[in-house]
Amino acid sequence: MRLLLTPSRRLLPVSCKIQQWNLSSHYKRQQGKKPPFEWIRTRAKLRPNSDDESEHEHSVPNNGDMKHIVNHGKTFDEDVDTRVDVEHIDEKSSGVLSASAVETNRDVELADEQMALTKALAINKEQLSEDLIRMIKTAERNILLLNQARVHALEDLHKILGEKETLQSEINSLEMRLAKADAQIKVASEEKVHAEQLEGQLEKLRNELFNRGGSGKSELELYENRNKMSNVEALLVSDGHVHSLRKEVDSLRTENLALKDDIQELKSILSNLKNSDERMVTLENERSFLESTMKELESKLSVSLQESSNISTLKVECKDLCEKVENLQCLLDKATKQAEQAFLVLQQNQDLRKKVDKLEESLEAANVFKVSSEKIEQYDELMQQKIKLLEERLQKSDQEIYSYVQLYQESIKEFQNTLNSLKEESKEGTLDGPVDDMPWEFWSHLLLTIDGWVLEKKLSNNDAVLLREMAWKRDRRICDAYVACKEKTEDEVISTFLQLTSSQPSPGLHIIHIAAEMAPVAKVGGLGDVVTGLSKALQKRGHLVEIILPKYDCMQYDRICDLRALDEAVHSYFDGKLFQNKVWTGIVEGLPVYFIEPHHPNRFFWRGQYYGEQDDFKRFSFFSRAALELILQAGKKPDIIHCHDWQTAFVAPLYWDLYAPKGLNSARICFTCHNFEYQGTAPASELASCGLDVHQLNRPDRMQDNSAHDRVNPIKGAIVFSNIVTTVSPTYAQEVRTAEGGRGLHSTLNFYSNKFLGIINGIDTESWNPATDMFLKVQYSVNDLQGKEENKDSMRRLLGLSSADDRTPLVGCITRLVPQKGVHLIRHAIYWTLEMGGQFVLLGSSPVPHIQREFEDIANQFQNHEHIRLILKYDEALSRHIYAASDMFIIPSIFEPCGLTQMIAMRYGSVPIVRKTGGLNDSVFDVDDDTIPDQYRNGFTFVTADEQGLDGALERAFNLYKTDNQSWQQLVQKVMNIDFSWESSASQYVELYTRSVTRARASASHT
């Protein structure tokens, strides 16, 4: 029980904290009139412990817990006094109670408490303890609720202040906009009425909030708590502890007095909160009303702005119309003045006309008498003048005739002297000297005539060899004999030639090309250009060159000179039978050419096209054997047999397996693959048709295809059986030795790398020459580029393209539309060129149906376009026109073994735009590549086969063309001066030929 009499330790810190809060809150109120936050944190420490509450909620306290119970009782007293103070504050604020009434009630309450304590002495202690616990818990809950209410009130107050500031800023902006709206729409009177209505509503709201109140519930709870406290005091007195309880009650009252001061402060805060609530409601109403007003004003403002904008546009239009009216008025004035002047002039002319008519009438009579005499005088004068002119001309003609006679006599003397000197020189010169003034066509025709005699059994092989050597050396004796025998019979010519036979050393090599194409008579791609260009270059170097071709029904026969059929046919083996082949001879580009026409029931070369037949393997294997049979039966002993692509790749195994044992063993075989994409593979059984042994050749080390063991590969067979293997550029030679570029033959090429190399092709610079090209409207050269501009304008008019701007760049493209050529990039280049402000012309077709249809759709899309034109066919004349007219030439190939179009384009002054692959990489070097010497930079290149790479190259080309005309012209002159002739390439081939023939002869001499 001593513990109950001990003062509570919880009361001391509470009082201290209350005083501390009083000081801080007082200081805060002096600093500003905003409610402080510090008192909330300080009073929060008075909250009851939830753990203590739960611990004693359902248990009876023992002696050790009495101290805690007493403390709860004190806390309860604090809460009671606090509620008294709160009620006092509410009564004072509402005007119900006064200060004296509060003190009287206090005395009455103390007396009642004493009486209640006296009556409560008989109550059970356990009942007392339970009542105290319930009262203490109730007091703690009330205090907790009060603290929470304070915290929420402060939070709401700060929110209200923030909203007030936000609302104030919105009001400010709204006032500014209202001021502008007032000035524009002049509706100040309406807004004034709204403002008066708003003030009336605000006054009503303030009155309603001021009349709110009611605190009866708090007074009733205070009265009940005080009765309970009086009962507690009576119980303690009856138990003998009244004195100690009184002390505790006194201390509680003291603390309640202190709490009164705190509650007084709280009163002012609560009043502020009420005022804040009122202001919040008022401001909320104002804000909602102002928002609606602002929306109305915004709508009106938008309408006024639209009207003002319409008015401004109308003003501009009105101003323009006024200016136009003024201009028209000026023009009308001028026209009026001119009309008046014209009318005056017309009147004057009419007056003058009348005067002239009168004068003419008056002079007619006088003129009648004068006409006759004047005419006679004039006639006499004219006759005298003519006589003088005739006399002068006669004298001049006499002088000219005399001078011409003298010149003629002198020229006759000079001619006689020259003729005498030439006779003397011819007598002094050797009879076997070479003839340089006869064209190559003459010697080719002579060689074909000799070969025809051999095949027709009119001349022995030995005599034919000697006569070929004389023609080979361009011997004057055989030339003179052939010219002298033109009017003689064939037998007389042969007898004359036999008298000339003598053993003469050969000046060069005898080379026979066996190919499926030859430009211009049978051309599909670059193969035909290579065969013709290389053969002409070799012929100029003094070598005997002949070509053997199939006789297609679709050849350009008008480009063949002296075409005739030989009387004797050549028989060749195929499918176990002998078939007759008719042999034709002719001259193409000065070269002797043999055309083989098979008399086979399948009509191999009467198909209307060169390639693309289902039996191409049989067609060209037949031709390859027939060509070797022609060489054998004609008694030829060539040094080199040069075959091209898979169509004549059969020549290599046929030569060594079948014809070398028959005596045709003088030649070395050179094989050139122009494109490893096309290999002509077929089932191995088809190889037997031309007489080759399938069992021996369908082996991995011979002709068996590396990808399918039941198929044979003609290209692989040519690589294995040829003495020399070449391709058409050094870069492509490296690319095909990789798995990606070799198309399955990379391992074979690497195995035979010692005889494999790349030699870049050339072009026939005589045929492709803008200075002599008769297909062009205007010929031009590197020193006179005006003709190129005229050809550009001519082609634009020919194709219906726009000629409005001469500086619009024209991009040309001539190609076969196959995946190898980058058809997707060509398609993109068409649209990209158009987007960059250029013109595009495409010439070419596709053997792939869906690609052909795709480009036909594009051609139809741009059928009448002024900047794009697609011609989906091949046209030799138009191709030359495009080369001459285009400023740039695009070749975006995925892979390109060599490519001739970039060389031809540069020959005609068209700057190439190419992808760096194959022969394009060996012939075109980027103008912006600092690693390349400046003299070799001749175009624009890109690496990746995508649209971004092509776009970059095209953009750089367009930028240079449009911004630096001088540099562009220098670039055009540079590309036209580059030597792409066959001279360099032919010399490399001659070196390969000579080395191979020399090794063969050396090997033969040792055996």
Image (spheres, rainbow, N blue to C red):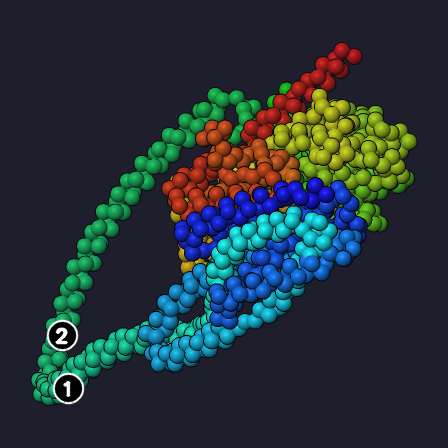
Answer few, some or many: residues within 10 Å of disc 2's Cα (few below 14, many 20 plus, some between 14 and 19). Answer: few
| Residue 669 visible in the shown view | no
| Residue 348 visible in the shown view | yes
Please report the residue visible at 68 percent of the width from the left and 17 percent of the height from the top.
998
Query: Between disc 1 and disc 2, whose residue precedes?
Result: 1
The C terminus: image quadrant: top right
Please state the horizontal and vertical placement of residue 224, each as a whole percent of the image: 66, 64
Please state the horizontal and vertical placement of residue 110, each as a whole percent of the image: 60, 60
Question: Observer-nearest residue: 344 or 636?
Answer: 344
Badge number at residue 347: 1
Please report the residue visible at 58 percent of the width from the left and 69 percent of the height from the top.
215
Tag 1 and tag 2, C-beta contact below 8 Å: no
Query: Of the residues tagged 1 and 2, which is closer to the observer?
Result: 1
The answer to which quarter of the image holds residue 736 is: top right
- Residue 319 is left or right of residue 64, and the answer is left
Please report the residue visible at 70 percent of the width from the left and 41 percent of the height from the top.
2
Question: Please, what is the three-letter code of the amino acid marked with disc 1?
Answer: Gln
Q: Is residue 678 above or below residue 804?
A: above
Badge number at residue 125: none
Please state the horizontal and vertical placement of residue 200, each as a whole percent of the image: 43, 79
Label 1 to label 2, Cα distance in Å? 41 Å
Look at the numbered disc 1 and give the secondary structure of its residue: helix
Q: Is residue 47 above or below residue 984?
A: below
Question: Observer-nearest residue: 209 or 628?
Answer: 209
Look at the numbered disc 2 and give the secondary structure of its residue: helix
The N terminus: image quadrant: top right
Question: Please, what is the three-letter code of the amino acid marked with disc 2?
Answer: Ile
Question: Observer-nearest residue: 472 or 929?
Answer: 929
Badge number at residue 376: 2
